[in-house]
Amino acid sequence: MSNKVKWAVLGSGGIAQRRTIPEGIIPAANAKLISVYDVNAKVNAEVASAFGVKAAGSIDELLMSDIDAVYIATPANLHCEQVIKCAKAKKYILCEKPLGMTIKETQKMITACKKAKVQLGTAFMMRFHSQHQAALQMIEAGKIGKPVYARAQLSCWYPLIKGAWRQNPKQGGGGSLMDMGGHCIDLLEMFFGLVKAVSCFIRSGVHRYKSEDSAVAMLQFKNGALATVDTFFCIPDNSSKNVLELYGSKGSIVAKGTIGQGQAGEMAAFLDGDTKGYEAQQARQQTDGIQIIPPPVNMYKAEIEEFSQAIIDKRLAANNAQIGIQSQKVLAACYESAKKGKRIKIIA
Ligand SMILES: NC(=O)c1ccc[n+]([C@@H]2O[C@H](COP(=O)([O-])OP(=O)(O)OC[C@H]3O[C@@H](n4cnc5c(N)ncnc54)[C@H](O)[C@@H]3O)[C@@H](O)[C@H]2O)c1
């Protein structure tokens, strides 16, 4: 393996075109984009021409190009079959969330990758946000004390669009909870550890499509802490501030706008009796809390660089398949809880 991983993109037309190719694969120091494929040939040709790479005419042709890894950004119901195909071709795979439609599908994907001796990663890029990393360091250093309660919010306005795969549970696996709640759950597990049980409500409150547009999940972590995740497809974009709140026995970390696709956001820590404050260079003590302002990091670049480096170094990536299947277990428990009206324990 050279010092650059050679990448292909499967499903070049959506988030790949908007974010992961221009902000991630192209600028990543240890990655090189070779070829792209999308079932929409027109879009694929545009992406290929914009980035000066090969436009493959099929998945088979994509897999025959000189590549090491594939980034999969197609609708959720296609991930399982496509990951298995890429694994059989001995390619490393970074797959968008949710990895599969069900835990069973995700287990099949993981097994296929293990058998082919290729690593499978989950594109939970929000873990790489520099303020999330700064918050994690503070929690790990005990700055907020014993974790007590957290809230993660991610909502948007997503009206009925004919043929939109997210609006049909058979293609998206669910609505706002599956699509955006998965990010929130994953982030909270990064901060507070694994979830052990959930209680959840979902409904279609505003829009007339089959997937839920409203979800609130209550989480109980193995360490005893509690959390809520609220995620809606029916709140106007500017009305949801996508807050992240992390409370402990010695203080809190509160953020606005860090959950999302951008690298912006405001974050402050409120620490009881800590006159020295956060000691990393980037923090400044202010009366309205300790502002946490580390240098911004592009999350898409960071996720590609981490996964590429893991391939080069032959080590487990931070954005590995375990975080993907874990969030899927929590999501499945949330849907079961909503359906049965009961608290559900996460299966080990
Ligand atoms: N991490 C993030 O920031 C983020 C943001 C948005 C979406 N996503 C995830 O990325 C994935 C794609 O979402 P999206 O919003 O880009 O969807 P999208 O519908 O905008 O784009 C999906 C692309 O896949 C193509 N496609 C469909 N069927 C295909 C096939 N059989 N073979 C090849 N290409 C095919 C479509 O033509 C389209 O260009 C989903 O898993 C979603 O959850 C992640």
Image (cartoon, rainbow, N blue to C red):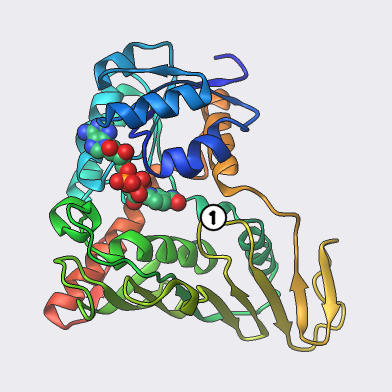
Q: Nearer the viewer, residue 57 or 101?
A: 57
For the point 61% across and 32% down, the residue is: 28
Q: Nearer the viewer, residue 58 or 113?
A: 58
Looking at the image, residue 241 sits to the left or right of residue 212; the answer is right
Tell me where residue 174 sits by quadrant: bottom left
Residue 273: x %, y % from top left? 79, 88
SS under mark 1: helix
Res 97 seen here: no
Residue 86: x %, y % from top left? 29, 25
Give the crowd class for mark 1: few <14, some 14-19, many >=20 residues within 10 Å.
many
For the point 28% across and 59% down, the residue is: 329
Looking at the image, residue 29 sits to the left or right of residue 229; the answer is right
Residue 264: x %, y % from top left? 64, 61
Q: Amino acid at mark 1?
A: Arg
Res 308 seen here: yes
Tell me where residue 229 sits by quadrant: bottom left
Total numbered labels = 1
Q: Nearer the viewer, residue 346 or 56?
A: 56
Residue receiving disc 1: 127
Looking at the image, residue 104 sits to the left or right of residue 46; the answer is left
Quarter of the rendered image showing ligand 1: top left
Query: Does residue 187 sit above or below 101 in this rendering?
Result: below
Residue 291: x %, y % from top left? 76, 74
For the point 54% across and 44% down, the residue is: 300
